Amino acid sequence: MKIKLAIVGIEGLPNKYGGFETLASYLVKYLSSEWDITVYCSSVDLLTRDTTYEGAILKYLPLSSHGWQGVFYDIQSLRDALANNEVVLFLGFGAGIYFPFISKKDQAKIVLNFGGLDWQRSKWNFLTRKLIQFFEALMVKNVNWVIADNKKIATYIESVYQIKSIEIGYGGDQVVKIQASEEWRIEYPFLKQHYACAVCRIQPDNNIELILNAFSNIDYPLVMIGNWSSSPFGQKCKEKYSTFTNLYLLDAIFDAGKLNMIRSNCSIYVHGHSAGGTNPSLIEAMHLGLNIFAYQSGYNEITTHHLANYFKTGEELTELVRNFREQDFQERRNKMQSYAKQHYTWSNVAASYKELFLNVYHQQNGA
């Protein structure tokens, strides 16, 4: 008899959104042959209505996983998951207000990964930040198992909550280097020259304006890929910076081959994330062997094993680009790629989660 595992807190599968969805998809891929997995999905957010994915059952709720509706989506998903499964992986913070009302027996089923310190993100207003921080505390204090995806997050959890977390990062070995074909060079003319690339959600805490402003002051092409139309902030940035001929502001690309091709052929990869823990797109850039210029956040230095170039201001980024010579960076780039292959693979991540899930199950059953 397979152990029943539920994954709660994401938009759903197949992955069309972000890091937690990517994590869920690879846990399903590596564990579904041994576990009876149910993944909770939003029928509002997803265009597809598949009933299964890689052997996992997809269970839909008629609520959005985003915004305030996401709180009710997460609570309803979690309630159902706890009633019908032996282990529940909860991703995010949306159901935080519900955790104190969960029985001790059901709290023991939950493995919590709240990601980074989302309440630090500048995209939220003051009240929302305080609520997210409050939700985080309610969750951490009412579960037995907490995952940290970055050593800095683990230190934070221990210092604030006096709780030892389990450190498990992310994988990035699904990406592959792809050479640009002549057809793609016609579609994307910037492929014919050296260029910088950034892939991210278009939100303030990813230092979008800092990066765009820095490149608007130098004659070096930048390709930034993201969800420009999803927010007033993104729309405003695109309108302001689209006039610069060296800036290519592309909408989000969900075709993995095309995205890998654009990243593979860049001379510089710019990573501006300031909040959160280990970021999946940064790990993917490491696996691709790219020359990484990362925002000095503390998290990014740990992820890259202090082997990237780092900036804190637009001026510092501008100087890094102006002084960049690819041959000077080759040894560090190779070391970063080797580090990623050793520490950030999905098979290792899935094995670590599997070991943890088994511990959760056996402790409940006295084994």
Image: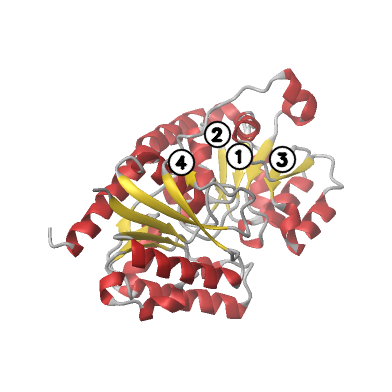
The Cα atoms of the two marked residues, 1 and 2, are separated by 6 Å
Q: Which label belongs to residue 269?
A: 1
Q: Name the residue beneath numbered marker 3.
A: 223
Nearest the eye: 16 or 81? 81
**Label 4 vs 1, first from the N-terminus:** 1
Q: Name the residue beneath numbered marker 2.
A: 290
Secondary structure state at the residue bearing disc 3: strand
Q: Categorize mark 1 by other alpha carbons within 10 Å: few (<14), some (14-19), many (20+).
A: many
Q: Residue at x 59, y 35 (%)?
A: 256
**Label 2 vs 4, first from the N-terminus:** 2
Q: Categorize mark 3 by other alpha carbons within 10 Å: few (<14), some (14-19), many (20+).
A: many
Q: Which label belongs to residue 353?
A: none
Q: Residue 351's spot in the image, x, y percent?
A: 30, 43
Nearest the eye: 325 or 1? 1
**Label 1 vs 2, first from the N-terminus:** 1
Q: Which residue is drawn at 53% across and 61% down?
A: 275
Residue type indicated by callout 1: Tyr
Q: Residue at x 78, y 47 (%)?
A: 216
Q: Categorize mark 2 by other alpha carbons within 10 Å: few (<14), some (14-19), many (20+).
A: many
**Label 3 vs 4, first from the N-terminus:** 3
Measured along the vertical axis of the image, is residue 164 above or below residue 3? below
Q: Can you see residue 72?
A: yes
The Cα atoms of the two marked residues, 3 and 4, are separated by 23 Å
Q: Name the residue beneath numbered marker 4.
A: 307
Location of the C terminus (image quadrant)? bottom left
Residue type indicated by callout 3: Val
Which quadrant of the figure has residue 366? bottom left
Q: Residue 276's spot in the image, x, y percent?
A: 50, 59
On screen, residue 196 versus residue 311, left or right, reads right
Q: Which residue is drawn at 36% across and 43% down?
A: 32
